[in-house]
Amino acid sequence: MGLFEKIKNGLAKTRDQLVTQIEWVISGKPVDESVFDEIEEAIILSDAGLETTEILMTSLKERWKRGQVKTSEDVKKVMSEEVERMLSGVEVPATANSGKPFVILCIGVNGVGKTTTIAKIANIYAAAGKKVLLGACDTFRAAAIEQLQTWADRLRIDVVKHAEGSDPAAVAFDATKAAKARGIDVLILDTAGRLHTKANLMEEMKKVKRVVGKELEGAPHETLLVVDATNGQNAIAQAKTFNEALSITGIVITKLDGTAKGGFLLPIAHSLKIPVRYVGVGEKIDDLIPFSAKEFSRALFE
Amino acid sequence: MFEKLQERLEATFKKLRGYGKLTEDNIKETLREVRVALLEADVNFRIAKEFLEKVKEKALGEDVLMSVTPGQQFIKIVYDELCELLGATNKPLDVSGSPPVSIILVGLQGSGKTTTAGKLALVLRKKGRRPLLVPSDIYRPAAIEQLTKVGKQLNIPTFAVPQLKEPLAICKEAKAYAMKNGFDTMIVDTAGRLHINDEMVNELVDQKKFLNPRETLLVLDAMTGQDAVSIAGTFDAKLGVDGVILTKLDGDTRGGAAISIKAVTGKPIKFIGIGEKFDALEAFYPERMASRILGMGDVVSLVEKAQEVFDERQAKDLERKLRKDEFTLEDFKDQIKQMKKLGSLESIVTMFPGFNKVKGMINFSEAEKDIKRVEAIINSMTMKERAHPNIIDGSRRVRISKGSGTSVNDVNNLLKRYMEARKMMKKLTKGGMKGLQRQLFMR
Ligand SMILES: Nc1nc2c(ncn2[C@@H]2O[C@H](COP(=O)(O)OP(=O)(O)O)[C@@H](O)[C@H]2O)c(=O)[nH]1
Ligand SMILES: Nc1nc2c(ncn2[C@@H]2O[C@H](COP(=O)(O)OP(=O)(O)O)[C@@H](O)[C@H]2O)c(=O)[nH]1
Ligand SMILES: [Mg+2]
Ligand SMILES: [Mg+2]
């Protein structure tokens, strides 16, 4: 399956809902003002939030006044262009060349899919012939270490781990040291989920980051925030707060294989301009695809 | 976000002072703000729309309490309706019937099912039950270990048999085991699944058919967005859900999903998860949830207090007097008395979003003293003087000041402010009371 197909499949339901709504609204009819309310509804239902909805609607209405939008095809084109423009700046593919070992620190709130995403990323690099190592810094959740280990066993890669309940920073330190010693190309650190509102847990993560940076200059090279597409407006708060505390360098959005649309990516991209690296579209090891603004918006509005 | 909302509300309220009836016009802006609040809280767009239509219809034509603005009162009505919609407090778990009774937890991936299974086991043990944890998530790596570890940590037995590789088989064996070993409740943890994945949902249907559970509980992440309606709706339609547990409410999500799922399924929210620890499970309180979703708790409590304190008939009477320009100092004294029942001046002011900005500028202890002084002065007047302040000449002023322990200047001041206020009131057909109070106290 080609990449385009895959992302289309992953986003199929998303797109179907949005497009069906838009189509239903304007099927064949020439565009007039009354359809705007319903297009607005469709955008809000994607979790894009009111601010972004307003931006999109303003642009649409302006172009409509200028006579650039006459049919349903035009509406889709304008919306798609607008979304793509908002997202094109954050389409920056992941690379792992700016350090050796290249250290990726994976963070996010509880249950979004950090561990699974790590396995998927590890798979991508391992398949590209890189030496990958994992660090099990989620020492809090029951069997989090075993979960990561199970994935690692399937991929035949190593995990640096301590006992449950130990200091995550100590694991991160050991993992970084081991990665250096073993000539590892990519080290990925799994961490416990934490709500961005919990100051003590954010401090804990800052410490992990500091420790890694001390052991290896420039590390972590990527601080990857994982967000869940089924979330609503809170994802925006997550991105803002995690970014303030830990300077995120990349975002992964998971669970886009459901009916949720993850429209909050638009305001996040708009305000934070942080690269979106991947899209998670399932629970299997290869259900992770590079993010593409064009395909994301095309799949949404085609 | 909250800050922004407060600001917007302040602007709205400023324009809406006064009383009368709730009309399309005087709640228009508040209606818009409430809509924004609901959508920012992730209440589903369509649910929010229908809900507000209904509430508006209900509210129009209602008399406005004289102590609040139409906007504030409308928010209170919205709040009451939200509470009503969200349903009753603390619906207990149903574990009746012949043991072993089953409770089955279902939901999307990562919503908190396994953690919640542990939390429920604790709740049940406290009630004197003997729960057995049953892990049936054979898909997520180490999911069975996870529940087993949770059980160990809580000292609650877990039915984990590595040879069993199929959810239905696990349920069957677990039930036999529970019967043999005297467990009266089975808490069945299941694999996360998307509601649209038919194959996976059918697997649950089979499990449910066999277990015939007392409770099929949907575990839903409180951060869920617009899609909550489709998640809850589909799970309920395909599987039949008895209740909902809303997790991760310890964060800053406004939790509008609660409204969406309640509106779509009508099923009660039985518990809320407020942390990763196993005692972090609470009963559900609709009032708290409604305040959280609206982000307007203070306004609501102000209106509630006002409702308690202000007698409607008295208010009508006062309104008539104001209109006819018969408002006397005696009436004013009554007003002060009622206002004091609301709490200290500072606490009252704090409850008005519009006053947050000026709060720092008011010296509250001075203002309270001022009120006491006004009361004392009026108390030292005869009834005739209170009804006809015009007759209070120089010598009466001296007498009043002596009687109230204030200076003649204080008495002059009060009378001057009262006269000005009355003059001003003539111009105002509505909102006179507020204007008068401000004129008298907030120099
Ligand atoms: N449908 C779907 N499920 C996912 C995806 N990514 C992760 N999951 C599931 O979400 C659940 C939580 O994932 P996990 O990696 O343990 O999350 P963590 O707590 O953030 O580490 C698991 O059941 C995963 O299988 C995705 O892209 N799509
Ligand atoms: N902060 C917080 N985290 C929770 C709550 N409930 C569950 N979690 C966390 O959410 C993540 C996923 O929980 P889990 O029980 O594995 O979800 P499952 O995939 O549905 O079984 C874990 O990190 C839990 O610790 C809650 O009420 N508050
Ligand atoms: Mg994890
Ligand atoms: Mg689980």
Image (spheres, coloured by chain):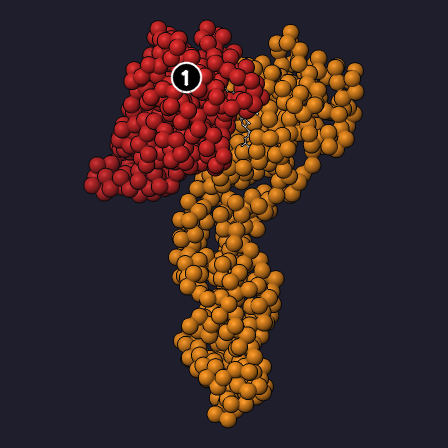
Q: Name the quadrant of the C terminus of chain B.
A: bottom left
* Residue occupying the point 75% across, 14% down: B176
Q: Amino acid at mark 1?
A: Thr
In the figure, what tint was chain B given? orange
User: Viewed as shown, does residue A196 lie left or right of A99?
Assistant: right
| Residue A48 image position (x, y, % from top left) | 38, 35
What is the chain letter for disc 1?
Answer: A
Q: How many numbered marks are there?
A: 1
Q: Name the quadrant of the N terminus of chain B.
A: top left
The quarter holding residue A44 reads top left
The quarter holding residue B304 reads bottom right
Which residue is under mark 1? A176
| Residue B103 image position (x, y, % from top left) | 68, 26
CB of residue at label 1: within 8 Å of ligand 3? no
User: SS class of the residue under badge 1?
Assistant: helix
The quarter holding residue A86 reads top left
Query: Where A185 sits versus A217, above or below?
Result: above
User: Viewed as shown, does residue B385 lie left or right of B9?
Assistant: right
**Residue that sits furthest to the bottom in the current view:** B395
Mark 1 surroundings: few (<14), some (14-19) or many (≥20) residues within 10 A? many
Q: Kindly tell me whether residue A284 is visible in this rendering.
A: no
In the figure, what tint was chain A given? red
Query: Where B218 sits versus A289, above or below?
Result: below
* Residue occupying the point 31% across, 32% down: A273
* Residue occupying the point 45% across, 20% down: A172
| Residue B140 image position (x, y, % from top left) | 54, 16
